Image: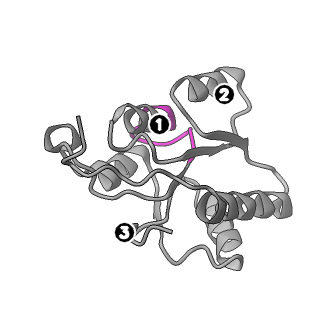
Amino acid sequence: MNSTYEVEILLVEDNPRDAELAMRALKKRNLTNKLVWVKDGAAALEFIFGNNHRASGHILNRPKVILLDLKLPKVDGLEVLRQVKEDSKAKTIPVIVLTSSKEEKDVVRSYELGVNSYIVKPVNFDNFSEAVAQLGMYWLLLNQPPEPRAKAEAH
């Protein structure tokens, strides 16, 4: 594991109930030590890139994984996904859409923008908890991401 990660999970979820369920499920598996929860897309972009991310050319915070709802206030999840995946330094961060939307257009658009996985939130509490716990286990413990590129390596 790379020790340079300060935040492991960025949870982008405007529904407090869903956020609490996700955090509780991750805590049961001891995966919440380095979790940050933001409630809208604008806050997610500010967390990752800072206020002027395009001008600065660097990433402020690089989580190991982003759990992203699509239906968000201020900036929707698809726009967050687009900006993360279009940024040369952020695009390798795995983004998992965790949403209640079963709309085919949302699924297709998410994959067109580079989402790593698209999961429809189960309605049942136990199923939802298990889905989030499995996501956390896979993306934090099993997945092997590339090392972040140093500025000198950037082309």
For discs 3 and 2, the disc positioned in front in the rendered view: 3
State the residue position of label 3.
Answer: 4
Q: In this view, does 81 lie above or below 36?
A: above
Where disc 1 sits, the SS reads helix
User: Magenta segment: does it hold 77?
Assistant: yes
Q: How far apart are marks 1 and 3 (CA)?
A: 23 Å
Query: If you read the primary sequence from the N terminus, does the residue marked by circle 1 or circle 3 appear first?
Result: 3
Q: In this view, does 125 lie above or below 104?
A: below
Query: Residue at the spot x=44%, y=59% of the render?
Result: 63
User: Could you say which disc has been placed on residue 98 in the image?
Assistant: none
Q: x%, y% of residue 11? A: 52, 58
Where disc 2 sits, the SS reads helix
Q: Is residue 30 above or below residue 106?
A: below
Left or right placement of residue 8 versus residue 31 in this view: left
State the residue position of label 2.
Answer: 107
Q: x%, y% of residue 110? A: 58, 29
State the residue position of label 1.
Answer: 81
Give the residues in magenta.
68-79
